[in-house]
Amino acid sequence: MDFWPEFLANSWGREFVAGGVGGTAGVIAGYPLDTLRIRQQNSATGSAAQILRRLVTAEGPFSLYRGMAAPLASVTFQNAVAFQTYAILSRAIDINSAPDDPPSYRGVALGGVGTGAIQSLVLSPVELVKIRLQLQPKTNLNGPLDVARTILRAEGWRGIYRGLTITVLRDAPAHGVYFWTYEYTREGLHPGCRKSGQESFGTMLLAGGLAGVASWICCYPLDVIKTRLQAQSLSMVKYDGIVDCFRRSVKEDGYNVLWRGLGTAVARAFIVNGAVFTAYETALRCIFRNNESPAAI
């Protein structure tokens, strides 16, 4: 009976619930564009429109949501880890700041880098399963648990964590840029909101969207390499590590391959992260309103 009031009375509980709400909103809002991005990155030919038309014609519109169960199943925990880790790290870096003051931009950036590195431990296997599901043909449909079990049986834990290194290299700097851009943009759009927490929904949407765009642009070539590495199975190994994948991809398709699908990713990033931060901040406000005022925290 008393579990939820006690759970939501501490910062970890609030971050867990709000992070889950934000993450769920982001997955649902941007998943079709994520499927299109993965197809572009792993394809040798075709524009976004051509790939989308072929996919919908051959496999139906619901193919755009294939594999969504994997990120949805993990998104609450993943976002709880991300937002709570970020809150702890950004505060820990600014040990001399007052408790009521927001973390410095330096703390925000470094806290984001640490958050991205830690989150990769959860995100890497989830994205591996998601990518395999998004790329499988319609005639061979399996759920996320079936795919995960197949990878574990055939490749072991090393297989399920294929691409972990490149995920860390992508996510650590990207999350630093992500959180810094969000905090800087929302403060610029709504001065004083970092301390008051009273920015408008328009500010949340725009700052969150721009944060997502900035983080994807800075890490996109690494994401292309990650997709190609995680798309291969033990029985069909094409690349011998990160450097070999980079070298062969560029040799076969030119340097433009490193930016293939960027337009789709940027459009998705704006929609997803606008939804994530808006849902996250709104959930926090609702929790505060139902429990206690922010000033009392």
Image: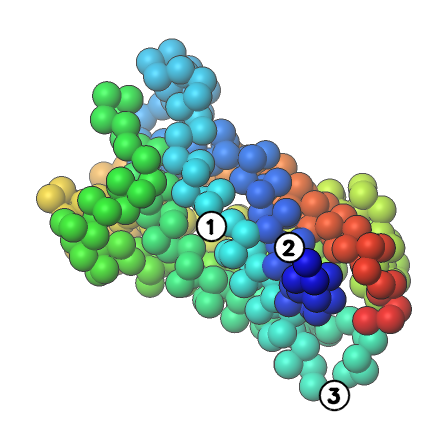
* 220 on left or right of 201: left
Tell me the amino acid under the disc marked 2. Answer: Val
Q: Give the vertical position of 89 relative to 97 (above or below).
A: above
Mark closest to the chain's N terminus, 2 or 3: 2
Q: What residue would you read off at disc 3?
A: 96
State the CA–CA distance, disc 1 to disc 3. Answer: 35 Å
Regarding residue 241, the answer to whether it shows in the image is no
Image location of residue 282, percent across then percent down: 76, 48
* 292 on left or right of 256: right
Q: What residue would you read off at disc 2?
A: 17
Q: What residue would you read off at disc 1?
A: 74
* 206 on left or right of 237: right
State the CA–CA distance, disc 1 to disc 2. Answer: 13 Å
> Within the image, what quadrant is residue 107 found in?
bottom right
Image location of residue 83, percent across then percent down: 61, 62
Image location of residue 155, percent across then percent down: 16, 53
- Name the residue at 60% across, 51% down: 20
- Tell me if label 2 and label 3 are in contact, CB under 8 Å: no
Q: Residue furthest bottom?
A: 96
Looking at the picture, the colour scheme in use is rainbow
